[in-house]
Image: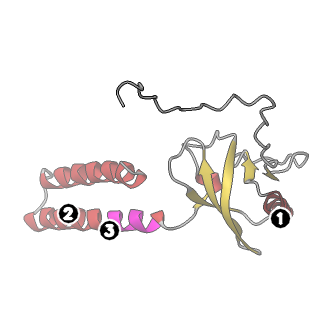
Amino acid sequence: MTDLSYLFLPTVFLAGLLATLAIWSRRRLWVKLGALAIAGLFLPLSYASFATLLSKPKPASLEWWLQHADSATVLGSSIQEDRGIYLWLQLADAIEPRAYVLPWNRDLAEQLQAAMREAQANGGQLTMRLPFEPSLDDREPKFYAMPQPALPPKDLNPPAPTIYEQARRNERDA
């Protein structure tokens, strides 16, 4: 199930509960029918609003389930001056990448650009440290390029090659 299903199921339950309360209340029939119609319109409207939110980047301050992530791989970014820093992150605990927006911070944007240049020059990945923790600690960078991966070790004593020989026929059989 996706996050959309997890958010929509409690909404359906609450709308059903409200509709049940409206039906069993001591009101006129037209009030009960109006309450049922409102509950019926509420469900597709809430589903459409949840589905619309899926395509928008989530503010990093609203991440509750994955807030204790130590690091995340930055797959892409877009910097909008005075608006925000938009990131496409691959978290270790999540299967699919997710879009987030950080509040605008000039120093953080410059740090992201410098780390992107370094990662591109090294051919490595860009990583973000503590992506959801609001920290005022400027001693350690928030974004950093992963070091260039080490070359595979050379085997100084390679194993002898395997030699396959065709079985010789017995000369008498020939």
Query: In the rendered view, how is the structure colored?
Result: secondary structure
Q: For this view, does 27 lie left or right of residue 154?
A: left
- Tell me which amino acid carries mark 3: Leu
Q: Is residue 122 visible?
A: yes
Which image quarter: residue 164?
top right
Report how many numbered discs are placed on residues in the image.
Answer: 3
Callout 2 touching callout 3 (CB < 8 Å): no
Answer whether residue 36 is magenta in the image. Answer: no
Q: Residue at x 32, y 68 (%)?
A: 45
Q: Specify start and end residues of the magenta stretch as a single range.
A: 46-53
Residue indicated by mark 1: 117
Query: Where is 74 relative to 152, above or below?
Result: below
* SS category of the residue bearing label 3: helix
* SS category of the residue bearing label 2: helix
Mark 2 or mark 1, earlier in chain? 2
- Tell me which amino acid carries mark 2: Ala
